[in-house]
Every structure is written in C-alpha cells, then in structure tokens.
Image (cartoon, rainbow, N blue to C red):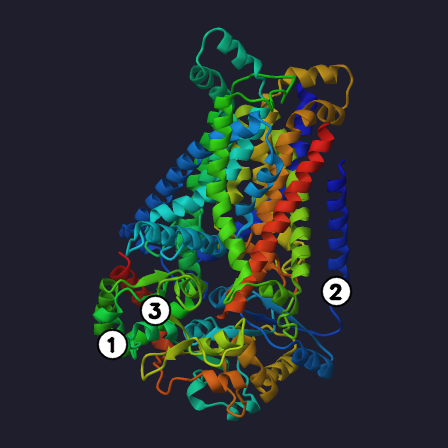
C-alpha cells in the first residue's frame, strides 16, 4: 500500500520475532513489584551469575495496584516473589493468603519492631517515615519558625501554607492520615482535619502533584509545607543540579508526627522454584543489597548492619518515635477513616 | 447484488469482531464474574451503599454535566478553527497542524505543570498582572476549580474536533454555498441552512468522542480539578485500588458502560436519521490562498486563539526544561544521557523514544486495519443492526482502564493467551482505544458516498477491492490520515495501560516521565520536563512528516 504502512508492517514482524526470541534461559525467577522498585544493575547481575538464573522483574503499577494484581492472579501466579507490600496493606495481603512462610536466617539482623508478621510470610526489607517537609529558605526569609509538630499546622500563622495528599488516592496520603489518627486519637483527628480545612489546607491527588505541583522548594508552587518522606531532604541534595552543602528542605520528625511505612517481601504460594526464591529473599536482606537500596529508592534499610550512604548520614534523620498502628486495626478501620476524612475535609 | 454484498461485509467485520471478542469482551466478562462471585476470598466489599447513599448518584451527575459542558465549549471554540483549516491555505499551516496534536500525547501531570506555570498563583500571567497593576494578591485564582479542568479538557480535545470537522468540511462541494449566496442568502444563512446540516455527521462524530473522553476523564479531573471533584472513573479507581471493593468497582464500570452504550447507540441512530445525502465528486477544491480582508481577520483571530490556547502552555514547558537554578541550562538534557546508568532500570532516552515510536506505529497499523474494515462494514450494513455494532465498537473507549486492566491480569496470563509478558500486549491495548477513533474519522465520509456509484462499478465488472481502491479510498483518504494521526498519538501518550503492561526494560516515554517525577530533586523535575519536550518534538515532527508526505501524494 503505502511506504509508511510497509514500514509498520515490517516492524510488527520484527516485534513478533523479538518476542519469539525472548524465550527464557534454562532457569528464571520472576519478581513482581511496584513502579518505584530500583536497584543496581551490578548486584542483580552478580546474583544471576552465582545462581545460574535469570531474574525477570514485573512492574505492575503503584504499590496498591501491584498487590491487587498479585491477589487476582492467585490461581495462576504471575511471579515467584512479590516485593513492595507495606504495613498499610499488610493485613489485606496476609488475609488473601498468597504468601508462604520463610524463616530467613537473616531475620536475626533485622530490628524487631519492623517484623510485623509473626508467621514470617512477609519479611521487612526497608522503611521510610512519611512526615512533613518544609522549605527552609521560605521560612528563613520571612523569619517565621517552621512547624515542629502536627498541632502547629492548625495555628493561624500557618494558615494557607500546607499541602497534603488525598488519602483516598495516595499512599503517603493514607500514611499521614494514620499519623494524625495516632496523634489525636479516634475522637480528635476529625476535629484536627476540620481545623486544617479552616486553615486552608490544599489537598493534592498524589505525591508528585503535591511535591512538584504545589511545594515552593520544588517548583513554582505556593505551599512551603508538604507531606513527603524523611528521605526527601537527602534526595533533594542527591538529585540537585548543583552540588549542595545543605539540604533545601527539612523533615519534621518529632515524636508522633511521622508515620513509619515498612515495605515487605514474600514468596508467592504458587512458586515452582522455592529454593531459589528463598535465596533471592536472603539476597534482598543481605548487606550489599541493603546498602544499595538507600540511594536507589530513598528508603532506610531494615538490616541493622547495613551502612547508610554519606548523603543520608549528612542530611537524613529518622523519627525516634514514629506513629505506628497495628496492621489489623488499619485493615479493619481504613475505609471508615478515609470516608470520614473525605466528609470532613472535602464535602 | 445484495446476496453478494452481505457476506463481504461480515467478512470485513470478522477481524475487528474477533479482536474485540478476545481483547475486550472475554477479559471484561471474566473480571465481572470474578468481582460478583461472593465466595471468592479476595473480594471483601459490598454493593449496599450504591443505592442507599446519594454519593454515587451525585458522582454520576457530576460526570455527565462536566462532560457535556466540556463538549459544548470545545465545539464552539473549535468549529471556527475547522473552517479556517478547511478553507484556507496560509503560511505555517502544516506546522501549526502538527503542533496542535501535541497536547494529545502529554501526560496529565505535565499538562498540569504547564498550566500552573502559566495560570497558577505564581504563574507568568499572575506575576505580570501583579507587577503591572501593582496588586498584592494574584488576580487569577483558578487552581483546583472547575474552570481549570474545563480549560484542560478544551486544551486536550480542541484539536480532535478541529481535525475531524476540517477534513470533512474540506471535502464538501462549495458550489452549493456559492449558489445560495448568489440567490441572495447572507453568509450566516448559507452557513446555517446549507453548511451546518452537511457538517452534522462530522460534528456529531467529534462531539461523541469528546464527550466520552471527558466522561472517562481521570487524571485531568483528579489533578487540576482537585480532590473535591470525582468522576465515575476516579471512583472506580478508588474503589478498586484503595478499598479493594471489587463488586462496587465492577458495578460502577457497568453503569459507565451502559450509559455510554445508550448514548453511542443514540448517536448512531441520529446520525443515520439526520443523514444528508449529498455527494461531491470534486472534493477539496475550495482551498484558497487569496483572501479578502474579513477572511484575513477570521484567519488571524483563529490563529491567535490557537496560539494562546496551545502554544503558551507548551512554551512554558519548554522554558522550564531549559531553566535551571542559575538561568539557562542544557544540564537536564545532558543528564538524560548520563544519569543513573548503573540502575537496573536505566534506559537511555533514545531507546524509550524508539519504544514509543515502535508501539505507536504498530498500534496505528492495527487501528487502521480494524478501523477501516469496521467503518466499511458499518457504512454498508442494514440500518438497525449497524447502529448496534457502531455502539459496540465504541465501548472500549468508555470502559474503565482499571477494570479492563484487571481483566487482562486474570485472563491473559494463561495459555492459550499468555501475553502478559509479551511486547505485543502494549500495542494491542493501545489499539483497543485507538481504532474507534479511526472508525469515527472515516465513517462520516464513507456514508456520503452514494451506493449506486459502487454498484455501477461492480456492474462494470470491477472486483470489490478495485472498487474500494478507486472509489472509496480517494474520497476518504484525508479522513484516514486524520484517523492514523490520532491512533498514533493516542498510543504515544497513553499512560494508564502502559504502566500496567510495559515490561520494565522497554518503557514508553510517558512511563519514563513518571519515573522521574516519583522522586524529589530538581534534576528529576528538570529531566521530566526535558523528556516531555522530547516527546512533544517527536510527536510534532512525525506529524509534520506525515503531513508533508500526504501533500506530495496529492500533487
């Protein structure tokens, strides 16, 4: 017909051949995970070489979407391993009964307060604190003291300064809502949010909209306070255009003002290669990989022996007493909390 | 004659029909069955709230009125533009046409950034107004309002209406209007009584597409409208991903599908009823380059409007990709090639460009084959049946991406359709939403061709394919080109399905942009903007080449 169509036709053929050629090597292990997963090429290549295996990664949308796909494909699993269940969805994942227990020898090196699943079906890999970040320069310029805790946000001097994520559509949004529930209690948190509304809070759909769309330190936004992570200040330094001595932002990590989000890994029940899958889980908890992920995903390692990279040591802090809520309680109450929040803040 | 015609029609339709059966009906049916089966351990939700609380009725009502309003505004603004593009030749027309398709491929987050840079509280317009009029507060305050996302809907859909209507308008015979004017009709009367009725099929087609697009709007409403507004699509996402209430998500998807099906059926029925049988054997002779001064004013007004609507936000984007902390920089573009090359999922930007183009060309090819054969079938089949099939073909556009995505997960991961890990799944998913566009572009033109013309050719002994090549094809060539352009750009810009289905090592450009936007730091933001500009450039130049190519074919 016409040359354009011919070109496209040969392209389809090439694609088909390519697909046919990509038939897997002798052994392969599939890891299902979310969009944000990242590690060094080198480490994975070493693991593949040592074990004579090809690792395939299946990224399936955000953390919630990926988990649901793992649950939906329960009868015909897409993967051997799932990485990226967090403590907000932990109960849902366990209830769906898609993981098999594994008592990894490396569990001894992991701090006990991260181990939320006593049956060891889900093993903690890393954690991060969801907390307030503020634009240091903005507050310094106006000689206003930056917020120290959640209760500060509803004071008149912080009117119109905060942007949060909608817990109905965003994972840090839920985490921050949980922090307020833990701080102000079941009776008080709705009043706090009603006051936030009076204090002109902006609610963004998701993290990237809040951070890159509204936060003064990241774009032309007009909000100097944003809900982000404790690891965002070092990330802002690491991904800075020009080398920075000091982080442009700071995290608010006073007792109870951050919510600790823990990410877990688990072996899926239908896996046909359990020995290898267990090796991979050990690998994920081992020191080299644990030291690698901080700079790749901006999270804190669960293995206590892992050293933090320099940029973390200089610019990152973790919360001493983060807010934590038992996964069972989150699972039982989450929908009610989000509904109540939606009514109080948006309607 | 009739006996000979029917089987050919069905033969033509068998391919699109099979495609829809396998990649639409089968996964959807499966996910619905799964969602509504109460015994399954995975599902926890209930349907009780659907009718007992007013929330869902309110969401449906909001979805309908915002879609209707967006459609009306887009039509009013785009039809004058279509007139200019159909009737006049002017400097830079081809380039402008290519540029206008760019909004279509931009991810919502990027569009939002562009609009904020322009109209946000700290945006260019506000800061200029504040300094000129010495104001203390920004005068324009439309962030997180209905106005903001209506504007974005116009921004996204303006081109679609313009292209579909203009390509049809250009093929109308101007002699009727000239005759009417000679008989004393005013230009307005001539437009109202003659041109408008003739244009209705194309306007209807375009309006239907805009309506469905805005009805299923997800990112635009979510980000620009703010959390106070939710369309049915947003609610389905919330129910499925956050609450894991699959029965509710499925029920809402069904409501969405049924509503749009009825609407599309109504459209198919109306467009047949109101059909004006008018045929011109000398299409597209009206283009003129010598214009009178009122015409010049009309052209300039439209071009200025297009520039304001399209170029200003896009310029804001381009500027931010070149603006670092200390003014002008090429750093973001350089970083794209040298960034975290040690990362497992690092892809050189050039390879994501090639991925995107490869997927888009494949999806375009599939869409053209399926779209043209469906349109030919619809134009020739019996009336009532064809209305039904017409609406059926459009269904993928009105179906929630999340629901269908889950359907793919539970059906396409097992033999005989083990496609979850195959590269071909991405263009297939794109084709599903792109080929209805081709149908809508081509069908109005095909219906204008009187059947006796084809019959005459048949009687003279021409084979069906020869008839098609010599009679149908030349008359719908322009429409096919527009359809191809939209199929290509839908695939270039698609994010929802791509993020579910692409393999991590072969990401498309929108997927790469999202990867950058998921971590703090101005390098990430800058690289996302730079990548968006490359996406714009690639799209724009592809269309410019297609435009040039089709022009050389004309002459």
Front disc: 1 or 2: 1
Q: Secondary structure at mark 3?
A: helix
Q: Residue at x 30, y 61 (%)?
A: A342
Mark 1 chain: A
Residue carrying label 2 = A23
Is residue B106 among the parts visible in the rendering? yes
- For marks 3 and 1, give the CA distance: 14 Å
For the residues labelled 2 and 3, say whether their Cβ atoms are less than 8 Å apart.
Answer: no
> Can residue B504 be seen from the camera position used here?
no
Nearest to the observer: residue B191 or residue B533: B533
How would you rate the neighbour count of disc 2 (Cα within 10 Å): few for under 14, some for 14-19, many for 20 or more? few
**Are discs 2 and 3 located on one and the same chain?**
yes
At which x and y percent is residue B250? 44, 53
Q: Position of residue B518 (x, y in %)?
A: 50, 67
- Point out residue A188 in the picture as x, y percentages from the top left corner: 21, 73
Q: Name the one closer to the observer, A340 or B188.
A: B188
Mark 2 or mark 3, earlier in chain: 2
The residue under label 1 is A185
């Amino acid at each position: 017909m016409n040359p354009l169509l011919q070109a496209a036709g040969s392209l389809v053929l090439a694609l088909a051949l390519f697909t046919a050629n990509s038939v897997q090597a002798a052994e392969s292990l599939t890891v299902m995970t979310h969009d944000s997963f990242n590690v060094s090429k080198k480490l994975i290549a070493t693991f593949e070489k040592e074990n004579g295996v090809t690792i395939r990664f299946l990224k399936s949308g955000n953390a919630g979407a990926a988990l649901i796909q793992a649950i939906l494909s329960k009868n015909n699993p897409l993967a051997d391993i799932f990485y990226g269940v967090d403590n907000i969805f932990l109960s849902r994942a366990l209830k769906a009964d898609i993981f098999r227990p594994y008592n990894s020898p490396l569990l001894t090196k992991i701090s006990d307060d991260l181990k939320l699943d006593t049956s060891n079906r889900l093993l903690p890999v890393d954690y991060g604190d969801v907390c307030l970040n503020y634009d240091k320069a903005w507050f310094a310029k106006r000689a206003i003291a930056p917020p120290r805790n959640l209760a500060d946000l509803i004071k008149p001097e912080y009117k119109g300064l905060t942007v949060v994520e909608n817990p109905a559509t965003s994972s840090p949004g839920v985490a921050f809502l949980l922090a307020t529930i833990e701080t102000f209690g079941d009776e008080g948190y709705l009043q706090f949010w009603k006051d936030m509304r009076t204090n002109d809070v902006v609610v963004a759909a998701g993290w990237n909209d809040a951070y890159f769309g509204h936060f003064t330190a990241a774009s032309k936004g007009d909000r100097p306070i944003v809900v982000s992570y404790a690891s965002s200040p070092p990330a802002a330094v690491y991904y800075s255009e020009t080398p920075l001595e000091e982080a442009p932002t700071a995290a608010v990590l006073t007792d109870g003002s951050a919510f600790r989000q823990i990410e877990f890994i688990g072996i899926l029940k239908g896996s046909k290669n359990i020995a290898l899958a267990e090796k991979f889980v050990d690998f994920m908890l081992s020191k080299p990989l644990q030291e690698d992920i901080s700079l790749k995903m901006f999270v804190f390692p669960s293995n206590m022996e892992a050293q933090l990279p320099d940029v973390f040591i200089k610019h990152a802090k973790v919360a001493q007493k983060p807010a934590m809520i038992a996964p069972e309680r989150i699972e039982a109450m989450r929908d009610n909390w989000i509904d109540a929040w939606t009514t109080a803040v948006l309607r | 004659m009739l006996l000979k015609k029917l089987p050919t029609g069905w033969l033509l339709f068998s391919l699109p029909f099979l495609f829809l059966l396998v990649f639409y009906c089968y996964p959807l049916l499966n996910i619905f069955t799964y969602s509504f089966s109460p015994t399954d351990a995975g599902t926890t939700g209930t349907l009780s709230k659907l009718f007992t609380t007013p929330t869902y009725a309110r969401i449906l009502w909001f979805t309908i009125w915002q879609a209707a309003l967006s459609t009306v505004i887009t039509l009013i603004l785009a039809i004058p533009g279509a007139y200019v593009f159909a009737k006049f030749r002017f400097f830079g027309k081809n380039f402008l046409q290519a540029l206008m398709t760019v909004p279509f491929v931009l991810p919502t987050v990027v569009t939002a950034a562009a609009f904020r840079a322009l109209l946000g509280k700290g945006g260019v317009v506000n800061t200029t107004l504040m300094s000129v009029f010495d104001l203390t507060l920004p005068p324009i305050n439309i962030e997180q309002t209905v106005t903001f996302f209506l504007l974005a809907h116009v921004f996204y859909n303006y081109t679609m209406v313009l292209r579909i209507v203009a390509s049809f308008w250009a093929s109308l015979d101007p002699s009727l209007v000239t005759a009417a004017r000679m008989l004393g009709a005013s230009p307005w009367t001539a437009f109202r009584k003659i041109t408008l009725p003739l244009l209705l099929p194309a306007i209807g087609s375009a309006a239907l597409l805009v309506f469905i697009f805005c009805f299923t709007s997800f990112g635009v409403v979510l980000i620009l409208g703010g959390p106070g507004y939710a369309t049915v699509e947003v609610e389905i996402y919330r129910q499925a991903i956050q609450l894991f209430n699959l029965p509710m998500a499925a029920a809402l998807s069904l409501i969405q599908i049924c509503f749009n099906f009825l609407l599309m059926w109504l459209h198919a029925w109306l467009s047949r009823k109101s059909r004006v049988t008018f045929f011109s054997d000398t299409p597209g002779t009206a283009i003129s380059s010598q214009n009178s001064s009122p015409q010049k004013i009309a052209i300039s007004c439209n071009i200025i409007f297009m520039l304001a609507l399209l170029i200003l936000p896009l310029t804001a984007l381009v500027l931010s990709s070149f603006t670092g902390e200390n003014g002008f920089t090429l750093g973001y573009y350089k970083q794209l090639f040298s960034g975290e090359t040690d990362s497992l999922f690092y892809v050189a930007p050039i390879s994501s460009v090639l991925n995107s183009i490869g997927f888009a060309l494949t999806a375009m090819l599939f869409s053209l084959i399926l779209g043209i054969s469906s349109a030919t079938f619809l134009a020739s089949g019996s009336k009532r049946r064809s209305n039904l099939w017409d609406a059926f073909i459009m269904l993928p556009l009105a179906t929630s991406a999340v629901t269908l995505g889950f359907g793919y997960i539970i059906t396409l991961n097992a033999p005989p359709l083990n496609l979850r890990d195959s590269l071909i799944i991405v263009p297939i998913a794109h084709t599903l939403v792109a080929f209805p566009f081709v149908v809508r572009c081509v069908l109005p033109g095909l219906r204008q061709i009187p059947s006796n013309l084809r019959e005459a050719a048949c009687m003279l002994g021409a084979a069906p394919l020869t008839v098609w090549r010599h009679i149908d094809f030349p008359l719908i060539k322009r429409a096919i080109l527009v359809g191809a352009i939209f199929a290509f750009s839908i695939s270039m810009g698609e994010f929802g399905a791509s993020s579910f289905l692409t393999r991590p090592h072969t990401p498309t450009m929108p997927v790469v942009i999202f990867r950058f936007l998921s971590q703090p730091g101005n390098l990430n933001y800058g690289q996302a903007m730079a990548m968006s500009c490359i996406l714009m450039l690639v799209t724009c130049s592809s269309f410019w080449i297609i435009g040039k190519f089709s022009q050389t074919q004309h002459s």
